[in-house]
Amino acid sequence: MFNRLLCFCALICCALFSLQALATTQPGKLTGGVPSIHPAWFKESFLDIAEDAEEAADSGKHVMLFMHLNNCPYCAKMVDENIANAPYTPFIKENFDVIQINIKGDREVAFDANTTVTEKELARLLKVRYTPTILFLNQDNKTVLRLNGYRSVPAFKHALDFVQQKAYLKTNLSRFIEQQQTTPVYTFRDHPLLKQVSDLQSVADKPLALLFEDSSCDACDALHDGHLKNPEIMKVLENYTFVRLDANSDEPIIDPAGNKTTPKAFAEQLGLTYRPGIVLFDQGREIERIDGLLFTYHFQEMLRYVGERHYVKYPKSFYDYLNVRTAEILESGQNIDLSK
């Protein structure tokens, strides 16, 4: 009887201790947000974009719409490294009118003759999924190039040259870069989870991560030395069949839907211009893609969203899932740094 009483008291003490620990758990902190400081030479636009496009064309320029979000670390990095303090900043000022659009903003934008909306409504219409998103517009106010997410300094210069030279009239960005960069900057690297699969339909029953690389990829080494060596990310990747495709290859493959194609043609069909780009499929259809720089937290959670099939519960947007996931992590007392 005495032993039972001792056990009962011990259980009560443990329960009280657990409740006290739970009650005193402090919420985690969300850090890493960085405000963008836009250069004073960004155009002071009245946000009549068609008029802006005409004015730019009259001066031999293109409009560059810089679509950003407050405290977005990717936006701040892009502005600092690729626009305000880039080795080619004078080239941007000479050839582009840069107009900033806050994708959560309430300013009224006349995007074209039929579309006058707030900044945030415009972002929804344009299906902006990443910040920054950059749209380059010609004199007819048509998008000639779209970049989703951060680009490295060399990669962004290729994009600027592509638009400034109006190469979009005869080719796409990927082929333009291939022609400009004749000396390889990247040699394909092995990874323990990469599989050699040419018939992608044969593995379509489970999540499929297609990694597109090529010899001109200046960011591929960083991917392998960073995310692809992270044990937590590698664990999430185990949910996938992980396949690399050479985006310049003309070798025959079968895509996830069963069509005969080549990696080069498939990348062009997908409209994928970022290297290293990762397209995430499940049951033969594309669910999401990583076509810009993502720091660790966003990269890992994007992989979890598809690899663990959270998209089934949150089908409208990855960010619906991410908001819930972030809240759960913070409530558990863990911190999240968005900028690492």
Image: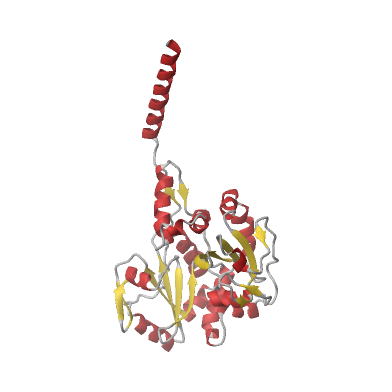
x 51%, y 68%: residue: 285
User: What is the quadrant of the N terminus in the image?
Assistant: top left
Q: Position of residue 87 (x, y in %)?
A: 56, 70
x 58%, y 73%: residue: 258
Asked if 124 appears above or below 331 in the picture, the reply is below
Q: Position of residue 209 (x, y in %)?
A: 57, 62
Q: Is residue 150 left or right of residue 43?
A: right
In front: 214, or 201? 201
In front: 307, or 105? 307
Asked if 283 appears above or below 90 in the picture, the reply is above
Asked if 141 appears above or below 203 in the picture, the reply is below
Q: Is residue 270 visible?
A: yes
Residue found at the far top of this picture: 2
In front: 44, or 295? 295
In front: 192, or 224? 192
x 43%, y 10%: residue: 2
Q: Is residue 29 visible?
A: no
Q: Position of residue 91 (x, y in %)?
A: 52, 77
x 46%, y 56%: residue: 310
Q: Is residue 40 left or right of residue 183?
A: left
